[in-house]
Amino acid sequence: MLEFSLKQLEVFVTVARLGSFTRAAQVLYLTQSTVSAHIQALERTLGGPLFQRSSRRQVCLTWQGEAALPVAREILNRCRTLEGIVRPRADGETLHMAASTVPAQCLLPGLMADFSRQHPGCRFRLRKGDSDQVHRLLEEGSVGLGFAGAALDPEHFLYEPVLQDKLVLITANTPRFRTMQEQGVLGRELLGEPILCREAGSGTQQRFDAYLEQIGMDLGSLYVVAQIDQPDAILGAVADGLGVSVCSALAARARLEQGSLLSFELEEESCCRNLYLVICQDHILTDLEERFCRFIREGAWERLK
């Protein structure tokens, strides 16, 4: 019988996903030496190297590691399923989370539904706000886990990328904008249009502000016709012709598929940002929180891409 542990597999999968021993140690609440020891023990048992260690900051999978990764994920997923079957219903357990608008609308509903099927007794308490508010709720201890579109304070919080979101410029679906889309016009060429923005604490707005700085502009140079703190309201106002907006492609997906909106890439290369799982540096995860984090790390979010 091969002598490896589930913890070794969890460490392996986490290092592979993050590409870093240091980052894996942070999100698993282990020392870096413990992470290295788990990987070395697993490599000894399996009889080959799993990672190329050409750089201290970044590690890559070997061909053996590439082959082992999907199997390790499957083992962990099956163990989580087994745990959900055998573990008595924890009817009193509640998972307290906070999420900014896009994760709350586009990410968490599917994750909660899938997790609930594996842990039928789990209950959820989800609070929604912008990225600033999510950080405040975490800091005051009102919630244990947060999801946000901006990494605001790496000194006091751990940020684990969960899903990549693209920023696009959206317009009403009118003949004028359809012609521009057919001509391959970029979103940056439409920033002279009346524009609708999110509130300052929004992760989407902060990423847009960073993009403007990158191209040598600022929000003050735009004709901001409205500032609205609800993405759905912005989408509706854009569809009705009030102006254009730069927003999350995930948030706009339903209206884009329905045809009430058009989207334009801001640049030739996509303008992206991460949606993060956020945890206070000094927060000790409960068993339920740890199970939910493992559930995400093992790839449950991939179906949402």
Image (tube, rainbow, N blue to C red):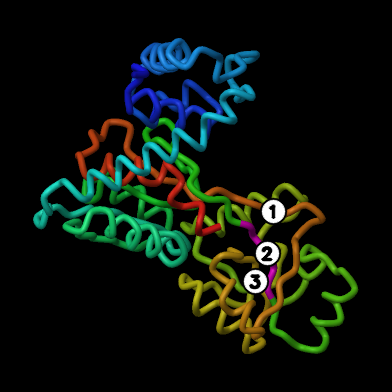
Which mark identifies residue 245? 3
Q: Is residue 195 above or below residue 277?
A: below
Q: Earlier in the sequence, mark 2 or mark 1?
A: 2
Residue at position x 58%, y 84% from top? Answer: 237
Q: Which residue is under mark 2?
A: 168
Q: Amino acid at mark 2?
A: Val
Residue 169 painted magenta: yes
Residue in front for this viewpoint, 247 or 276? 276
Relative horizontal placement of residue 18, taking residue 116 as reference (left or right): right
Above or below for 95 versus 291: below
- Single out the mark in the foreground, 2 or 3: 2
Q: Say which amino acid is labelled 1.
A: Cys
Residue at 33% across, 63% down: 113
Q: Which residues are magenta?
A: 166-170
Q: Which residue is mark 1?
A: 271
Based on the displayed image, in which of its 4 quarters is residue 246 positioned? bottom right
The answer for how far apart the CA atoms under marks 1 and 3 are is 14 Å
> Nearest the camera: 297 or 4?
4
Q: Please state which amino acid type lies under the numbered disc 3.
A: Ser
- Do the residues bearing badges 2 and 1 touch, measured as CB atoms within 8 Å? yes
Dot 1 lies on which element? strand
Q: CA distance from mark 2 to mark 3?
A: 8 Å
Sequence-first disc among 1 and 3:
3
Q: Main secondary structure of the magenta part?
A: strand
- Residue 258 as seen in the image, left or right of residue 232: right
